[in-house]
Image: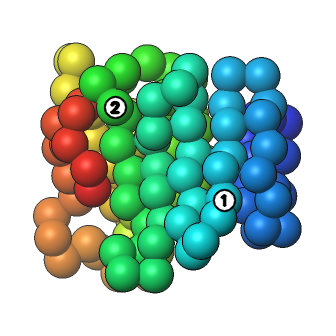
Amino acid sequence: MRKIEREMIAAIKAGKSTKLDNTEVRQGDGVVEVLLHGHCIAMNTVATGWRFTLAGWNTPTTRSRVSALLETFGGPGRRGVYTKLGQAYVKRYAARVQDPQGGDTPIDNREWF
């Protein structure tokens, strides 16, 4: 995990809004948003929990930021994003057993998951 990603996660856990180069964390009124170059790539609300997107930008930086957030806040089984032959996937890991859903999940670059 990159230094900027550790700082991003620390700000989220501390409940602070911050701007870290091209990454911004906004918090208030029970909503947390993470923006990369002004595009929202992650959001947490009481009603929905954490949601993630590549915001149409399947780049190494976007995947790295989303992967760091997934590792920390993604819940069971979702632990990162990668691309194979232009298709983005969410890495899936099951705790000590084979993943019953059959492995990694393809995602659309613009959709929320």
The crowd level at tag 1 (other Cα within 10 Å; few <14, some 14-19, many 20+) is some
**Residue type (three-letter) at the residue carrying disc 2:** Ala
Compared across the picture, whether 83 is left or right of 68 comes to left
Residue 52 seen in this snapshot: yes
Residue where numbered disc 2 is placed = 55
Real-space Cα distance between discs 1 and 2?
Answer: 19 Å
Which quarter shows the C terminus?
Answer: bottom left
Please provide percent x and percent y for residue 19: 78, 35
Q: Nearer the viewer, residue 62 or 1?
A: 62
Which quarter shows the N terminus?
Answer: top right
Q: Please identify the quarter of the rendering in which residue 81 is found.
A: top left
Q: Nearer the viewer, residue 30 or 55?
A: 30
Q: Is residue 56 above or below residue 14?
A: above
Please provide percent x and percent y for residue 89: 27, 41
Q: Residue at x 46, y 57 (%)?
A: 43
**Residue type (three-letter) at the residue carrying disc 1:** Gln
Residue 1 seen in this snapshot: no
Q: How many marks?
A: 2
Q: Residue at x 84, y 68 (%)?
A: 14
Q: Please identify the quarter of the rendering in which residue 47 is found.
A: bottom left
Which of the marked residues, 1 or 2, is nearer the chain's N terminus?
A: 1
Do tag 1 and tag 2 residues touch (Cβ < 8 Å)? Answer: no
Please provide percent x and percent y for residue 42: 47, 50
Q: Nearer the viewer, residue 92 or 63?
A: 63
Question: Which mark, by number, is residue 27?
Answer: 1
Q: Please identify the quarter of the rendering in which residue 61 is found.
A: top right
Please provide percent x and percent y for residue 56: 29, 25
Q: Nearer the viewer, mark 1 or mark 2?
A: 1
Q: Secondary structure at mark 1?
A: strand
Q: Secondary structure at mark 2?
A: loop
